Amino acid sequence: MSIFKKSEEKQQNATIEEFREMINSVHLPNHVRQIADKEVDMLSRMSPSTAEYTIGLTYIDYLVSLPWNKRTADNLDLGRASKILNERHHGLHDVKERILEHLAVKILVINRKPRVLVVDDEEIARRNLEHILTKEDYSVTTAANGVEAIGKLESSDFDIVLTDLKMEKISGIDILEKTKAKYPNTQVVMITAYASVDTAIEAIKLGAFHYIAKPFKLEEVRTTVKQALDKKLSTVSAKGSILCFAGPPGTGKTSLGKSVAEALGRKFSRIALGGMKDEAEIRGHRRTYAGAMPGRIIEEIRRAGSSNPVMMLDEADKIGQDFKGDPSSALLEVLDPEQNCSFIDHYLDVPFDLSNVMFIVTANIADNIQEPLRDRMEIIEFSGYSEDEKINIALQHLVPKQVREQGLSDYAPGFTSTAISRIIHEYTREAGTRNLERQIATICRKIATEFVHHKESIRNIEVTPEFVERFLGPRKYYLEVAGEKDRVGVATGLVWTEAGGDIIFIEAARMKGKRELMLTGSLGNVMRESAQAALSHIRSNAALFDIPADFFENHDIHIHVPAGAIPKDGPSAGATIAVALISLLSGRPARRDVAVSGEITLSGRILPVGGITEKVLAARRAGVKTVVLPLKNKVDVENLPPDVTKGLGVLLADTVEEIIGKVLTK
Ligand code: ADP
């Protein structure tokens, strides 16, 4: 028994020793090192057979494996970045431009002459410092006392403040606090006589970068200021507003994020916020919790192996709906440059500096992101693609990628653009290119298997429209608008959903009843209210539309929007509902190939709506010939790229009356 115990003890000692060596071998920041040492000491006194012992070992292992001080150097070559973005992505000019601007601002901040404020009440010291630093090509400003210094800090910002510690009235500590309160990134270096080194150390605890003892050595001043500047720049280059890519699925948000990482020479990682149910998934579980694990943020940092990756937080508009705990507080902290330098994961329980991470958030609809979070972000809109764009993206990017991935590089089949066009029309119905890519992948796979099985040559294959049908089977989608007759009481509308724009058909029917308005088809509250408004407007203006004034007497009206499983909401169906009703009540059929979108007021005016590009693209996908949009969206309409509106009539209307003239047949 005792022999057994002895060998167990020996084993434990060996393990503890191994851990101490591991801690020694990596460069940990002081506060982390202290915790690691303390944990190992505790474990050395613990029985290895306890669960806590194993948990403790796992924890230390984790702590040591994090890239506390590791970071990749940023590549700030704008030309190279632009080349990478253009090579990887077709189109998206505005988006690319905004990203390059974002990088340019960082480069500008980093490349300008660094500004230093020297504060010392001793003239000789002040002049000396000014001389040394000016020679190092800094732009130097001096102040002879605290009051003067504070005045200068008020009127402009500095990268570095070099301040004497002991001064009358306003001390170096006061200046440190003032500076840090106003410019948290500015680094403050204390100058001190030997006698006050203790106070200087105190100042470091308060946030000073370092101290220089008087009489100072030239070299020490140079290196300390240089290091302080590096620190300031490293935080600045990582900071700046957080980018939010918003748009329908498959429009290139994720792949562009990856390219940004590549352009900057940073690691890339991605966290899906969409499926998250618990705050602990972001922040981790406390170690006392059985099976505790770190949160996804820290785990992704560890996986990336550097503390400054580009981290994509996907689907920020999908959190909060079924989330346990307080998601906003956790995410707000992660995304707040003021707070995220000391992000605490519950499992780690030691602050980790996230301020060097470049966060890119994605969402389908930016408006659905919680407001405090949205306020932190610079929103960049991605819209759906026109058919021409999809064909280009497919031929230049998706086909080569799938040919590679399906192992066909040596026998690369050629796709004709008519084949791609057929896939787009008959096998996909989407704003982005996800399904298009999937269908291309299927074709490539089938080419590989079919031809390998039948030992036929797979060289020089050209995928034509006939091939598409052979490989993908019967068509999946038809133009919703074509081949159907114009009907009384059925109007075509356009809505904006998370997946991009979509076409809807609103149906209205009237029957004997008790003046009730029935609404069916998974309609949200806003859409129900629009229907009420449309009905009231028509009732109060019946004569205007050639409708008998008493049409509602002893009748019910039923409005239905088919595809009932899909929840629909938003004000932009108001005008379409009005068209369906007026068509029904006046007996004039509504043109099926004219689609309407607009919010309606009680007085019959048409208010502007969002998602114009998405709606127009959806109209074209469905085979609509003409769209009628609010006059107040004129600017959006004028800004539509020509290939989005190609072959489509776009009309503007300011009132229900104007719309009716364009949609109802005589
Ligand atoms: P999202 O993140 O918006 O859902 P993805 O980035 O996953 O979209 O894009 C889906 C696919 O389409 C990827 O293979 C991507 O490379 C491709 N893609 C989308 N837009 C473009 C584009 N403009 N140029 C090249 N490829 C694109």
Image: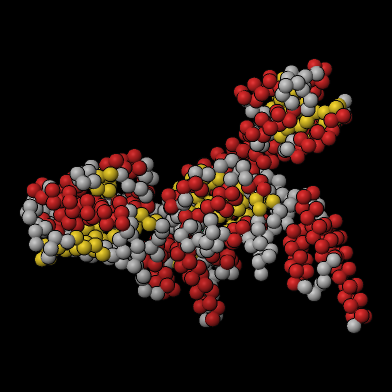
Q: Residue furthest top?
A: 123
Residue 243 x %, y %: 54, 46
Residue beneath the point at 61% across and 58% down: 283
Residue 89 in view in this figure: no
Horizontal arrangement in the rendering, residue 173 relative to residue 389 (left or right): right
Judging depth in this view, the residue of 225 and 550 nearest the camera is: 550
Horizontal arrangement in the rendering, residue 40 relative to residue 300 (left or right): right
Residue beneath the point at 27% across and 41% down: 631
Residue beneath the point at 52% across and 72% down: 445
Judging depth in this view, the residue of 653 and 60 nearest the camera is: 60
Where is residue 236, by image quadrant? top right
Residue 458 x %, y %: 53, 73
Residue beneath the point at 38% across and 57% down: 497
Q: Is residue 59 above or below residue 133?
A: below
Q: Is residue 289 above or below residue 613?
A: below
Judging depth in this view, the residue of 287 and 19 nearest the camera is: 287
Residue 602 in view in this figure: yes
Residue 536 x %, y %: 17, 51
In which quadrant of the rendered image does the N terminus lie?
A: bottom right
Where is residue 347, by image quadrant? bottom right
Residue 305 x %, y %: 71, 56
